[in-house]
Amino acid sequence: MNEKTMGAIPVSALERLEQSAVKLSLITFCLRHEELKAAPDAAEIHSIKSDLSRALREVSTNAAACALTGGIPEKAKASPPAGAEPKRIQRKEIPKGTAYGVLRLRCPKCGDVFGRFLREPSASVTCRCGGEVQLDNLTRYEFTCPCCDFEARGRTNLEDPEITVPCKCGNPVTMKWDRNKRMYHE
């Protein structure tokens, strides 16, 4: 059964709830104003009330599940049409000798160590002094800041036994080279 959803609530449940509420409010209005020529059929009122309570239960169940999980419950999610292929996520092709993301680099010309963030893959970065830093031979680093628990990762061209990288909170984090993992970490 493929139902459309509005938030976490199937549209069909909302429509049934709305229709039952309209019928019940119309009967209530007519009774209050004594415009009914004949008393409504008890079976009809019972049917409307049961439809209303069933729709209310379904809506409240879906809303509660949504509140607990923080999202749309699995059974309320619209499933893809039969025969449709699932959408595949394609990874970016990164050319060899390029890098992107968070970088901690040392300029070969002036020796200055600086940080840079690249949104797109690039083969080199220009330092303030005008020196070109090639991004073809970088190693990874990862750390969790002891002050703010921020988890960071990036790449570097530094070759020291220990490197220090500032966290986003300003705390300097020192990492050591791990020969087995071929990366810097705490």
Image: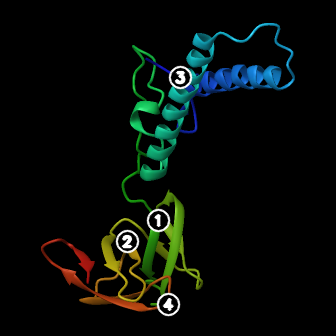
Residue at the spot x=36%, y=54% of the render?
96
Q: Earlier in the sequence, mark 1 or mark 2?
A: 1
Q: Which residue is mark 3?
A: 50
CA–CA distance in space, label 2 to label 3: 63 Å
- x, y (%) of residue 128? 59, 83
CA–CA distance in space, label 4 to label 2: 19 Å
Q: Which residue is mark 1?
A: 101
Q: Mark 3 is on which residue type?
A: Ser
Q: Which residue is mark 2?
A: 155
Q: Quadrant of residue 138?
A: bottom left
Q: Which residue is mark 4?
A: 170
- x, y (%) of residue 144? 34, 79
Quadrant (top left, top right, bottom left, bottom right) of the C terminus:
bottom left
CA–CA distance in space, label 1 to label 3: 58 Å
Q: Mark 2 is on which residue type?
A: Arg
- What element does badge 3 sit on? helix
Q: Earlier in the sequence, mark 2 or mark 3?
A: 3
